[in-house]
Protein backbone atom coordinates (compact mmCIF):
# COMPACT_ATOMS: atom_id res chain seq x y z
CA UNK A 1 0.00 0.00 0.00
CA UNK A 2 1.71 3.18 -1.16
CA UNK A 3 0.75 6.58 0.31
CA UNK A 4 -1.84 7.36 -2.38
CA UNK A 5 -3.44 3.92 -2.02
CA UNK A 6 -3.51 4.55 1.73
CA UNK A 7 -5.32 7.84 1.20
CA UNK A 8 -7.81 6.32 -1.22
CA UNK A 9 -8.56 3.30 0.96
CA UNK A 10 -9.31 5.56 3.93
CA UNK A 11 -11.51 7.81 1.78
CA UNK A 12 -13.56 4.72 0.95
CA UNK A 13 -14.34 4.55 4.68
CA UNK A 14 -15.18 8.24 4.95
CA UNK A 15 -11.78 9.34 6.32
CA UNK A 16 -10.49 12.22 4.19
CA UNK A 17 -6.85 13.15 4.73
CA UNK A 18 -5.54 16.61 3.81
CA UNK A 19 -2.17 17.23 2.18
CA UNK A 20 -0.87 18.37 5.58
CA UNK A 21 -1.94 15.12 7.20
CA UNK A 22 -0.32 13.12 4.39
CA UNK A 23 2.90 15.05 5.02
CA UNK A 24 2.65 14.18 8.71
CA UNK A 25 2.40 10.48 7.85
CA UNK A 26 5.38 10.84 5.49
CA UNK A 27 7.44 12.45 8.26
CA UNK A 28 6.26 9.80 10.72
CA UNK A 29 7.59 7.11 8.37
CA UNK A 30 10.94 8.86 7.89
CA UNK A 31 11.54 9.33 11.61
CA UNK A 32 10.39 5.79 12.42
CA UNK A 33 12.87 4.24 9.98
CA UNK A 34 15.72 6.55 10.99
CA UNK A 35 15.24 5.86 14.70
CA UNK A 36 14.75 2.13 14.15
CA UNK A 37 18.42 1.87 13.17
CA UNK A 38 19.40 2.27 16.81
CA UNK A 39 16.19 1.70 18.80
CA UNK A 40 14.15 -1.45 18.25
CA UNK A 41 10.74 0.00 17.36
CA UNK A 42 9.41 -2.30 14.64
CA UNK A 43 10.38 -5.26 12.47
CA UNK A 44 8.36 -3.70 9.63
CA UNK A 45 10.27 -0.95 7.84
CA UNK A 46 9.42 -1.20 4.11
CA UNK A 47 7.37 1.87 3.18
CA UNK A 48 4.37 0.06 1.69
CA UNK A 49 4.30 -2.32 4.65
CA UNK A 50 4.40 0.49 7.23
CA UNK A 51 1.56 2.34 5.50
CA UNK A 52 -0.57 -0.82 5.44
CA UNK A 53 0.34 -2.76 8.58
CA UNK A 54 0.95 0.18 10.92
CA UNK A 55 -0.78 3.33 9.66
CA UNK A 56 -3.86 1.86 7.93
CA UNK A 57 -4.23 -0.88 10.53
CA UNK A 58 -4.19 1.70 13.34
CA UNK A 59 -6.95 3.69 11.65
CA UNK A 60 -9.27 0.69 11.31
CA UNK A 61 -10.33 1.41 14.88
CA UNK A 62 -12.38 4.32 13.55
CA UNK A 63 -14.32 1.90 11.34
CA UNK A 64 -15.90 0.31 14.43
CA UNK A 65 -15.73 3.26 16.85
CA UNK A 66 -16.89 6.43 15.06
CA UNK A 67 -16.53 8.50 18.26
CA UNK A 68 -12.81 8.63 17.42
CA UNK A 69 -13.77 11.43 15.06
CA UNK A 70 -14.86 13.54 18.04
CA UNK A 71 -12.95 15.36 20.78
CA UNK A 72 -12.61 12.43 23.20
CA UNK A 73 -9.86 11.31 25.56
CA UNK A 74 -7.87 8.31 24.36
CA UNK A 75 -5.30 6.31 26.31
CA UNK A 76 -2.98 3.97 24.41
CA UNK A 77 -1.46 1.27 26.63
CA UNK A 78 1.91 -0.12 25.50
CA UNK A 79 1.96 2.05 22.39
CA UNK A 80 5.50 1.14 21.33
CA UNK A 81 6.20 3.25 18.24
CA UNK A 82 2.87 5.07 18.65
CA UNK A 83 0.39 2.58 17.24
CA UNK A 84 -2.56 2.94 17.09
CA UNK A 85 -2.83 6.30 18.88
CA UNK A 86 -0.64 8.60 16.79
CA UNK A 87 -2.05 7.65 13.37
CA UNK A 88 -5.48 8.23 14.96
CA UNK A 89 -4.32 11.60 16.31
CA UNK A 90 -3.02 12.66 12.88
CA UNK A 91 -6.28 11.68 11.19
CA UNK A 92 -8.48 13.13 13.95
CA UNK A 93 -6.64 16.14 15.43
CA UNK A 94 -9.30 16.89 18.07
CA UNK A 95 -8.44 13.74 20.02
CA UNK A 96 -6.78 14.18 23.41
CA UNK A 97 -4.23 11.38 23.58
CA UNK A 98 -2.26 9.86 26.45
CA UNK A 99 0.38 7.27 25.56
CA UNK A 100 1.78 4.83 28.12
CA UNK A 101 4.93 2.78 27.58
CA UNK A 102 7.38 1.13 29.95
CA UNK A 103 10.52 1.70 27.86
CA UNK A 104 12.10 5.14 28.09
CA UNK A 105 13.78 4.85 24.67
CA UNK A 106 10.37 4.52 23.05
CA UNK A 107 9.01 7.46 25.04
CA UNK A 108 11.96 9.57 23.87
CA UNK A 109 11.24 8.61 20.25
CA UNK A 110 7.56 9.50 20.70
CA UNK A 111 8.48 12.85 22.24
CA UNK A 112 10.63 13.70 19.20
CA UNK A 113 7.88 12.51 16.88
CA UNK A 114 5.13 14.53 18.57
CA UNK A 115 7.37 17.61 18.44
CA UNK A 116 8.33 17.21 14.77
CA UNK A 117 4.75 16.51 13.68
CA UNK A 118 3.57 19.51 15.75
CA UNK A 119 0.86 17.51 17.52
CA UNK A 120 -0.88 19.05 20.51
CA UNK A 121 -2.91 17.43 23.30
CA UNK A 122 -0.54 14.43 23.45
CA UNK A 123 0.73 13.33 26.86
CA UNK A 124 3.50 10.74 27.20
CA UNK A 125 3.77 8.64 30.35
CA UNK A 126 6.73 6.39 31.16
CA UNK A 127 5.13 3.68 33.31
CA UNK A 128 4.24 0.03 33.61
CA UNK A 129 0.67 -0.58 32.54
CA UNK A 130 -0.10 -2.21 35.90
CA UNK A 131 0.94 0.97 37.72
CA UNK A 132 -0.64 3.49 35.37
CA UNK A 133 -4.26 3.00 36.48
CA UNK A 134 -3.97 1.26 39.82
CA UNK A 135 -6.20 2.14 42.78
CA UNK A 136 -3.98 5.08 43.83
CA UNK A 137 -3.50 6.55 40.36
CA UNK A 138 -4.93 9.86 39.15
CA UNK A 139 -5.39 8.19 35.75
CA UNK A 140 -7.78 5.53 36.99
CA UNK A 141 -11.13 5.48 35.14
CA UNK A 142 -10.42 8.79 33.37
CA UNK A 143 -10.57 7.94 29.66
CA UNK A 144 -13.36 7.74 27.10
CA UNK A 145 -11.42 5.10 25.18
CA UNK A 146 -8.45 2.88 26.01
CA UNK A 147 -6.64 1.18 23.12
CA UNK A 148 -4.00 -1.52 22.86
CA UNK A 149 -2.35 -3.22 19.90
CA UNK A 150 0.07 -6.16 19.93
CA UNK A 151 0.62 -6.04 23.70
CA UNK A 152 -0.73 -9.22 25.32
CA UNK A 153 -3.52 -11.77 25.09
CA UNK A 154 -7.07 -10.57 25.67
CA UNK A 155 -7.32 -11.74 29.28
CA UNK A 156 -4.14 -9.95 30.35
CA UNK A 157 -4.91 -6.95 28.17
CA UNK A 158 -8.32 -6.47 29.79
CA UNK A 159 -6.73 -6.24 33.24
CA UNK A 160 -4.19 -3.69 32.00
CA UNK A 161 -6.67 -1.52 30.08
CA UNK A 162 -10.15 -1.59 31.63
CA UNK A 163 -9.06 0.09 34.91
CA UNK A 164 -8.12 3.21 32.90
CA UNK A 165 -11.48 3.43 31.09
CA UNK A 166 -14.18 5.54 32.70
CA UNK A 167 -17.53 3.94 33.45
CA UNK A 168 -19.54 4.16 30.19
CA UNK A 169 -16.22 4.44 28.36
CA UNK A 170 -14.68 1.80 26.11
CA UNK A 171 -11.69 -0.47 25.58
CA UNK A 172 -10.71 -1.26 21.98
CA UNK A 173 -8.34 -4.19 21.41
CA UNK A 174 -6.58 -4.62 18.07
CA UNK A 175 -6.04 -8.36 17.63
CA UNK A 176 -4.87 -10.78 14.95
CA UNK A 177 -6.58 -13.93 13.75
CA UNK A 178 -6.42 -15.46 17.25
CA UNK A 179 -8.61 -12.64 18.59
CA UNK A 180 -11.88 -14.58 18.69
CA UNK A 181 -10.29 -17.48 20.54
CA UNK A 182 -8.68 -15.07 23.01
CA UNK A 183 -12.00 -13.29 23.50
CA UNK A 184 -13.77 -16.55 24.37
CA UNK A 185 -11.14 -17.28 27.01
CA UNK A 186 -11.33 -13.71 28.40
CA UNK A 187 -15.10 -13.42 28.93
CA UNK A 188 -15.02 -14.06 32.68
CA UNK A 189 -12.09 -11.69 33.21
CA UNK A 190 -13.79 -8.92 31.23
CA UNK A 191 -16.93 -9.22 33.33
CA UNK A 192 -14.91 -9.30 36.56
CA UNK A 193 -13.17 -6.07 35.54
CA UNK A 194 -16.42 -4.23 34.83
CA UNK A 195 -16.55 -4.74 31.08
CA UNK A 196 -19.08 -6.04 28.62
CA UNK A 197 -18.25 -7.00 25.04
CA UNK A 198 -20.17 -4.74 22.68
CA UNK A 199 -18.73 -5.72 19.31
CA UNK A 200 -16.19 -8.05 17.72
CA UNK A 201 -15.45 -7.23 14.08
CA UNK A 202 -13.39 -9.14 11.55
CA UNK A 203 -11.55 -7.43 8.73
CA UNK A 204 -8.82 -8.22 6.24
CA UNK A 205 -6.17 -5.67 5.33
CA UNK A 206 -6.38 -4.62 1.64
CA UNK A 207 -4.45 -6.96 -0.64
CA UNK A 208 -3.55 -9.29 2.23
CA UNK A 209 -4.74 -12.59 3.69
CA UNK A 210 -3.97 -11.11 7.09
CA UNK A 211 -7.08 -11.33 9.26
CA UNK A 212 -7.70 -8.78 12.00
CA UNK A 213 -10.14 -8.64 14.92
CA UNK A 214 -11.29 -5.39 16.49
CA UNK A 215 -12.83 -6.09 19.89
CA UNK A 216 -14.83 -3.29 21.50
CA UNK A 217 -15.63 -3.61 25.21
CA UNK A 218 -17.87 -1.19 27.09
CA UNK A 219 -17.05 -0.33 30.71
CA UNK A 220 -20.40 -0.91 32.43
CA UNK A 221 -19.28 -0.79 36.08
CA UNK A 222 -16.30 0.39 38.11
CA UNK A 223 -13.29 -1.93 38.28
CA UNK A 224 -12.63 -3.38 41.72
CA UNK A 225 -9.72 -1.63 43.44
CA UNK A 226 -7.66 -4.81 43.55
CA UNK A 227 -7.17 -4.61 39.77
CA UNK A 228 -4.81 -4.26 38.04
CA UNK A 229 -2.60 -6.40 40.23
CA UNK A 230 1.06 -5.51 40.72
CA UNK A 231 3.51 -5.64 37.78
CA UNK A 232 4.04 -9.09 36.31
CA UNK A 233 1.14 -10.80 38.07
CA UNK A 234 -1.49 -10.37 35.30
CA UNK A 235 0.81 -12.19 32.87
CA UNK A 236 1.96 -14.89 35.30
CA UNK A 237 -1.48 -15.54 36.77
CA UNK A 238 -4.17 -14.47 34.28
CA UNK A 239 -7.65 -13.93 35.66
CA UNK A 240 -10.08 -16.83 35.38
Image: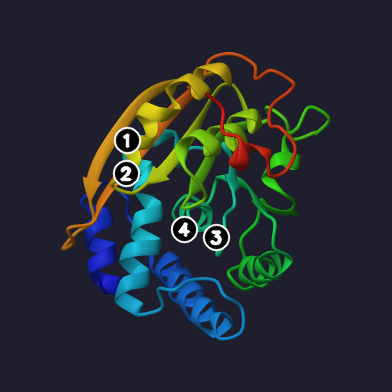
Disc 3 to disc 2, how far (Cα)?
23 Å
Of the numbered discs 2 and 4, the one sitting upstream in the chain is 4
Disc 2 to disc 4, how far (Cα)?
24 Å
Local secondary structure at mark 1: helix
Q: Is residue 138 above or below residue 169?
A: below
Of the numbered discs 1 and 4, the one sitting upstream in the chain is 4
Relative horizontal placement of residue 9, taking residue 165 as reference (left or right): left
The mark lying in front, picked from 3 and 1, is 1
Residue at image position (48%, 71%) is 42
The mark lying in front, picked from 1 and 4, is 1
Of the numbered discs 3 and 2, the one sitting upstream in the chain is 3
Label ID, residue 181: 1
In front here: 35 or 239?
A: 239
Counting from the top left corner in percent of width and height, residue 153 is at: 47, 42
Neighbour tally class for label 4: few under 14, some 14-19, many 20 plus, Cα within 10 Å: many
Residue at image position (59%, 52%) is 78
**Residue highlighted by disc 2:** 178
Label ID, residue 82: 3
Which of the 4 image quadrants contains residue 120? bottom right
**Residue highlighted by disc 4:** 87
The mark lying in front, picked from 2 and 4, is 2
Residues tagged 2 and 1 counted as in contact (Cβ below 8 A): yes
Which of the 4 image quadrants contains residue 232? top right
Amino acid sequence: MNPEQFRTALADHGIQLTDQQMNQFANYYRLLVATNDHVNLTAITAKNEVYLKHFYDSLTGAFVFPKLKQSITVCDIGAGAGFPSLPLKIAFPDLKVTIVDSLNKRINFLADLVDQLELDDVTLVHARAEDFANAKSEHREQFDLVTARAVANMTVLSELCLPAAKVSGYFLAYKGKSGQKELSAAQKAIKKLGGQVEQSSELTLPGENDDRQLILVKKVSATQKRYPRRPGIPTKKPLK
